[in-house]
Image (cartoon, rainbow, N blue to C red):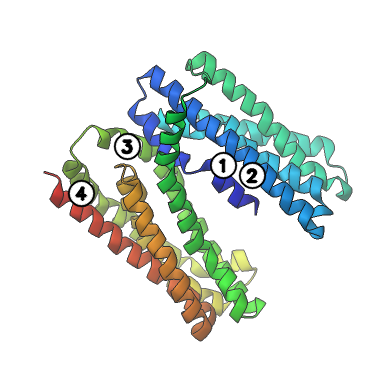
Amino acid sequence: MLAYFGILIDYGFDLSATREVSIHRDNKEKLNEIYSAVTTIKIVFFIISFFIISVIIFSFEKFHQNYLLFYFYFFILIDSILSPIWFFKGIEKMKYITFFSLSSRILYTIGIFLFIKEAKDYYLVPLLNFFSTLIIGVFVIIILFFSFKIKFQLVPYSNLIQTLKDGWNIFKSTIGISLYRNINVLILGFVCDEKTIGYYAIAEKILKIIQFMNIPVGETLYPHLSNKFSKENKKISVESLFRYGKYFFLVYMIIFIVSIILSKFIITFIAGKFIYNIAINFYILSFIIVIGGLNYYFGILGLVALGMYNEFAKIIMKIAIVNIFTVSVLSYIYKDIGASISFLIAESILLVLILQKLSHLKKIYR
């Protein structure tokens, strides 16, 4: 539940605001405006989320019994406001992100050793996480003010609306991606027993662990490409995407082959023993290492970096609908194998649609 409030508070700014910062990185006045607008909107969404979760907590007895625990975990989301990772990505100062993340974890770990003595202290875990986030967040604001001369200021209503519009399509895309990447287990729950669901869930978990390798590469390339694409003709940008895409394809193929070779070891490590049913699901899903990797490259580092937010959002929402339909049908017929096939179909159609859109852009821009 809290993950969805996190999506609301982030509102797609991790991509849209990062792109704006990368484009205007040399314009201090514009950077102040972007930072202030994004922060203002995040504060508003945080307050709205607080009221919504309060209604949920006090409307259901099982949540009300542990209301303090829910609030402690909720307030960790303030990190999205205090630590503008999107800003540092945009100016390509990744060392700050690493430093802030590491410092927060160190503080949190020290707190765990100092204050968690027995099982009844479990409620302190999210509280310690919150305080470590708060301390580092204040430190981040100080660095922004003194090192980068960035300060919070009131911005016109029209600027807030424009910032909301910029993030809207990425926000829709995030929801769509969450739907088609996370809903399969939920739908399987209606047609399968827990053991069968577990076969698919473990295979999907392994896939997502492998795909996580996309994140550091993407966070490094995205702001650079956003800045680069904003200064050149879209046709040239798309051509360079296709030109370098073959190298990404080669890397993903190597990862795919290595994953298949090591699949028995990986499954045994994750599941505790080698289970044939998990292996079958993983072999089907493993093709997504290549297809999904190219979707990330041509989608996020391509369409989104080009500023084609609306086009990307439309494609993602189509795929979310397709996946909901296919997983409902195929999981009813083929259980966990059907869910794996559905995920592969969704990712394959997504790649086709993204490549079609990029090919179209290359034709219309001269």
Q: Which quarter of the figure has residue 351?
A: bottom left
Query: Looking at the picture, which amino acid does disc 4 mark?
Result: Arg
Determine which residue is flagged by label 3: 226
The residue under the point 45% across, 52% down is: 172
Q: Amino acid at mark 1?
A: Ile
Which residue is tagged 1? 9
Within 10 Å of the Cα at label 3, are there few (<14), some (14-19), or many (20+) other Cα atoms? many
Instruction: List the residue tagged with mark 2.
Output: 49
The N terminus sits in image quarter: bottom right
Q: Give me the residue at 48% from left, 27% from top.
A: 35
Residue 97 drawn above or below residue 7: above
Horizontally, residue 357 falls left or right of residue 218, namely: left
Q: CA distance from mark 1 to mark 2?
A: 8 Å
**Mark 1 nearby-residue class (10 Å; few <14, some 14–19, many ≥20):** many
Give the mark nearer the N terminus: 4 vs 1. 1
Q: Nearer the viewer, mark 3 or mark 2?
A: 2
Sequence order check, earlier mark of 3 and 4: 3
Verify CB contact (< 8 Å) between mark 3 and mark 1.
no
Direction bottom: furthest residue: 333
Is disc 1 placed on a helix, strand or loop? helix
- Nearest to the observer: residue 111 or residue 55: 55
Identify the residue position indicated by label 4 in the image: 243
The residue at 43%/41% (across/down) is: 167
Labels 1, 2: front one:
2
Residue 9 horizontal/vertical position (percent):
56, 42
The quarter holding residue 92 reads top left
